[in-house]
Image: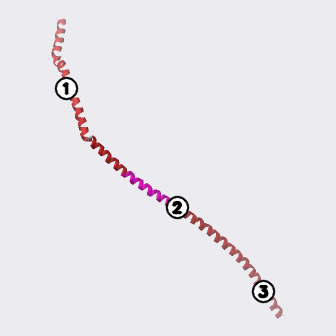
Amino acid sequence: MAATSTPDITGAFVHALWPFALFLPVILALRLALDRLEARTRQRARERRQGTLEQRLERAALGMSTARELLDGVEAELAARQSALVRLEAETRDWENLARLKREEADAVGRLLRHELSRGETRAFWQGALLNTAFFGLGVVVQWLLT
């Protein structure tokens, strides 16, 4: 009985699965056709979004002209900043020269003042010595007259 039950199970199994075996290639063919149709639809939608070649070229030209305008603005700003930098460097050199001159002038005035003070001190010393000698002499004369 076991031998007769195996072919019956196999036959029942083949009898139950034959519709799947028949429709499987049809389902695969339909799936491939559907994939191709979806790919074509996506390609057409992409082309519509991007536009025609002329439209894309116009957008590219517009983008390039916008970029050129931006570059011109950046170049103008860089030129203005560079000229400001040159002007500031020149002003810095002028101020440094002026500070150096002021320092040299201050040193010269200091030397002159020290010279005048030392000269004045020498002159004051001799004036004081002369005045003291005169008073000493006057004191000697008065003392001689009184004695």
> Which label sits in the foreground, 3 or 1?
1
Q: Position of residue 115 (x, y in %)?
A: 69, 73
Q: Does the magenta stretch include residue 75?
A: yes
Density class for disc 2 (Cα within 10 Å; few <14, some 14-19, many ≥20) is few
Displayed quadrant of residue 79: bottom left
Q: Distance between the residues labelled 2 and 1?
A: 81 Å
Q: How crowded is mark 3: few (under 14 residues within 10 Å), some or many (20 or more)?
A: few
What's under tag 2, amino acid-wise?
Ala
Q: Residue furthest bottom?
A: 146
Does residue 14 lie above or below 112 as drawn?
Answer: above
The location of residue 53, given as percent across then percent down, is 28, 40
As for residue 10 lying within the magenta part, the answer is: no
Please give the residue where the numbered disc 2 appears in the rendered image.
90
What residue lies at 50% left-to-right and 60% top-to-bottom? 88
Could you tell me the amino acid type at mark 1? Leu
Residue 46 sits in quarter? top left
Span colored in magenta: 69-92
* x 48%, y 58%: residue: 85
Cβ–Cβ below 8 Å for labels 2 and 1? no
Residue 45 lies, in percent from the top left, at 23, 38
Task: Judge left or right: residue 142 versus residue 103.
Answer: right
- Residue 30's label in the rendered image is 1
Q: In the displayed structure, would residue 8 be above or below residue 98? A: above
Pick the residue in front: 68 or 88: 68
Q: Which residue is painted at 47% across and 58% down in the image?
A: 83
Please tell me the numbered disc located at residue 134: 3
Left/right placement of residue 85 relative to residue 111 reads: left
